[in-house]
Amino acid sequence: MSQLISDIVYCENQIHQFFQNQKIGSLLKRSNINKEKGISSVAVFRVMFTLVFAGKNLFRTMAADKCCGMAKDTVYRFLNSIHTNWRRFLLLLSSRVIRDELEPLTVATNMKVLIADDTLYRRNRSKHVELLSRVFDHTDKRYYRGFRMLTLGWSDGISFLPVSCALLASNKEKNRLVPSRTDLDRRTNGARRRREGIRKATDVLVEMVAEATASGIQVSHLLFDSWFAYPVTIRNLLAKGMHTLCMLKVTEKIFYRYQGEDLHLAAIYRKIRKRRGRAKILASVMVEIGKNDKGISVPAKIVFVRDRRSKKWLALLSTDTTLGNEEIVTIYKRRWDIEVFFKMAKSFLNLAKECQGRSYDALVAHATTVCCRYIMLALDKRTNQDPRTLGTLFHACCDELQQTTFAEALALVLTILEQTLGAASEMTRNLIRSLIDRFLRELPPIYGTRWLIAWHNKAAYG
């Protein structure tokens, strides 16, 4: 009976609906995520998906829920598989949600963009995690052990969905603390992930954008911060058909061609005429950021805006020169959506906390699972026009997944038994309750006392 109640509660929650509506099982098979026998891959993935909402880790879930029919080794083999293509799975899921769920809710004139950024995937207490590296944190200005989680997301100004992600180790061998496995077939997805993990983030970003556009996601611009704002990267993205809108670094090592001269950003700012007063947009200029493969100069537009915090200036670059100054600033504001995603993933969805594995494949699987959780929450918030924040929505999902305790389940069974016996004319209500009380008192005290209290509470409050 307790299992029946648990199944009813489980089937009614939104996680079950999300798996059904988005055909998660089919997407897993298309991403080479399947099992030859035993527990299905979708069942194992569902266990990993629901861990954070149930408030339990994998060990406690396996110990408390014997009826799930799987051992922990089943989950570990699932996570450590070198044949699964997690990048493709996340891309298929996000493109399906965008195409079938979000685009019908978005005005056609509303600009859709991709947003790229990275965050620290910290494993500071680990020693033997594969490809573990010393990674510099630009916020704290110090090195930590872990990875850089490069993420590409889609936004229409209302909803944000992670489209693709990659865990990057340091591309410098001296900063890699643990080497990669050498016993893998180079043709497997796991071997490709490891080769990708030690490449430069800008090169990986160009490939991720190309994969996203090839999947059918309709976007026109890519937004990112100054850490990726190199002219060669911008030209490579433009060669893929993607316009870039980014913030620029104030450095003397990067030059732009302005009025026939190669000048760095500060020099350009000194030469131009600024608006008077306290204007938010100080000036804008047309520059060239080098030449493409055909030898043609690539034009771009730089907009200088006032920084309210430091009272200095910031520079935004757009390869789409048809955009107005105000439009460039307005579109770039959407880049903050990916920062909200990182905060949500770390604070609520247990990014870099839930998975304690040493395998690089397991870490990639965990990061992809966190992205899928966020997609479900973002979709539910959008389709239901829910005014609550994602944090509140997360706690609501946790409440839905609270399983009925065994004591409450037994109290419910006894209530049903009371109602059934009450249908017999020879059984009075007092007689039924006295029989149930006698049965509970005959049980061992460790069980009987607790269930007796639960039974009386159930009887008192209905």
Image (cartoon, rainbow, N blue to C red):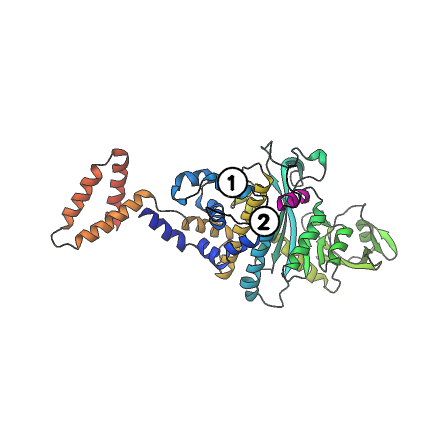
- Per the image, label 2 sits on a secondary structure element best described as helix
* Residue placed furthest toward the bottom: 108
The residue located at (69%, 39%) in the rendering is: 170
Q: Which mark is residue 97?
A: none
191 sits left or right of 352 in the view: right
Q: Earlier in the sequence, mark 2 or mark 1?
A: 1
**What's the residue type where badge 1 is placed?**
Tyr
Q: Which residues are magenta?
A: 180-196
**What's the residue type where badge 2 is placed?**
Trp
Front in this rendered view, residue 197 or 108: 197
Depicted 165 relative to depicted 174: above or below: below
Residue 130 percent coordinates (x, y):
62, 36
- Per the image, label 1 sits on a secondary structure element best described as helix
- The residue that mark 1 highlights is 76
Q: Which mark is residue 86?
A: 2
In magenta segment, residue 257: no
